[in-house]
Structure formats: C-alpha cells, structure tokens
Amino acid sequence: MWRFYTCPVDDQLAQRGQWSVEQRAEHAALALYGLHQQSKSISMHHPKVPLGKALHRLRTSERFSAQAVDARVNAAATSTRPAALLMRLRGLVDQLRVINQPVDYDGLMRLVQDWHYEDRRRSARRRWAVEYQVWAQQDDARANGAASNDGAPTPS
C-alpha cells in the first residue's frame, strides 16, 4: 500500500510523531479501500461513483433494508468527530463490499479531510446528502412513472 501514499510529509509534525490532516485522511481512505477491495477481482475504487451515490445503491440493493441503511448513513453523516465518522464508514464499506459496489476513494479522502473542520464538515454533509437524496428522488420518480404507466404507451 505504500506506493499509494501521495501526501507530502510535514517534517516538523513528523519529528513530533504527528501527522497532518491530509495524511490522516489519506491513510483512512486507503485503509477503507483495503477493507473494501479484500478478495475482489475488480477494483472497488471508481472515480465517478461518489459516496452518496454508492450508498443509495446499497439502499436499493434489497440486500439490506432501506430503513437500516438510512439509519447507518444518518449516524455517519451526523457524527461530529472524524474518528466516529470512520468507525461508521467502516460498517457501511463492509456492506458496500457485500454488493460489490465501488466508491470514489479520492472523494472519500476529501470527505474525511473536510470532517476535521466544522465549516467544511457542514459543506461535506450537504454534498453527501445531495448525492444520496438526489439518486433516491430520481429512482422514486422512475418508479412512479412506471407505476402510473403500467406498461401502456404514453399519449403524445
């Protein structure tokens, strides 16, 4: 995994046995990726699948109840400390692993990095909520359109 570490090392912090926020976020994202990728033949990193979209796919996978996924996502999104966020993300990544759902781990690294700062955490939560809810609304609209059509052609 060492070759995947790209953040510069802050020598002053390193001399004190400390790491930068960027290094912590990178390490957390790589650790979650390692958990997700374990025993998989295809990459569980996909740059065009933000976390919210991946979690929405988990919600609609029928492998786990939508209410249970919503509760786990809410618990992660409302956490106030990076350590709590990472603990909750670990459980969600375990579930994403079960359904073979990739995630953008570069985006996840930015999310973890943002979680260290209150103002950026609020913005990250909004982005995450939009990703999660927009996909839900689009799926609901498609389902409602299909239900109202009942397979019949729509009038022009």
Image: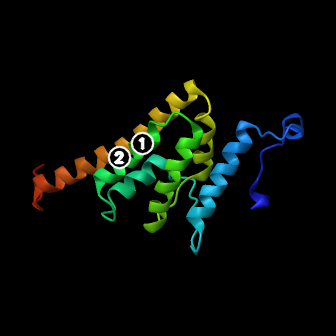
Along the viewing direction, whichever of 81 and 150 lies nearer the viewer: 81
Q: Secondary structure at mark 1?
A: helix
Q: Give the residue pinned by disc 1.
A: 75
- Count all numbered tags in the image, as a single digit: 2
Q: Position of residue 47 (x, y in %)?
A: 57, 53
Q: Amino acid at mark 1?
A: Ala
Is 19 situated left or right of 152 in this image? right
Could you say which is closer to the camera, residue 135 or residue 98?
98
Q: Few, some or many C-alpha atoms within 10 Å of disc 2 (few <14, some 14-19, many ≥20)?
A: few
Assign the N terminus to one quadrant of the image.
Answer: bottom right
Q: Quick check: can you spot residue 50?
A: no
The residue at which mark 2 appears reads as 71
Residue 132 picture quarter: top left
Q: Is residue 39 visible?
A: yes
Question: Where residue 58 appears, x then y in whole percent?
Answer: 39, 58
| Rendered residue at 54%/49% (across/down) | 87
Q: Residues within 10 Å of mark 1 (few under 14, many from 20)?
A: some
Q: CA distance from mark 2 to mark 1?
A: 6 Å
Badges 2 and 1: C-beta atoms under 8 Å apart?
Answer: yes
Horizontal arrangement in the rendering, residue 136 relative to residue 72 (left or right):
left
Q: Report the front residue among 60 and 155.
A: 60
**Left or right: 143 as drawn, with respect to 79:** left
Amino acid type of the residue tagged 2 in the rendering: Ala
Q: Give the number of the disc on residue 109.
A: none
Q: Residue at x 60, y 41 (%)?
A: 112
Q: Percent x, y for residue 134?
A: 36, 42
Which residue is located at x 45 percent, y 39 percent?
A: 77
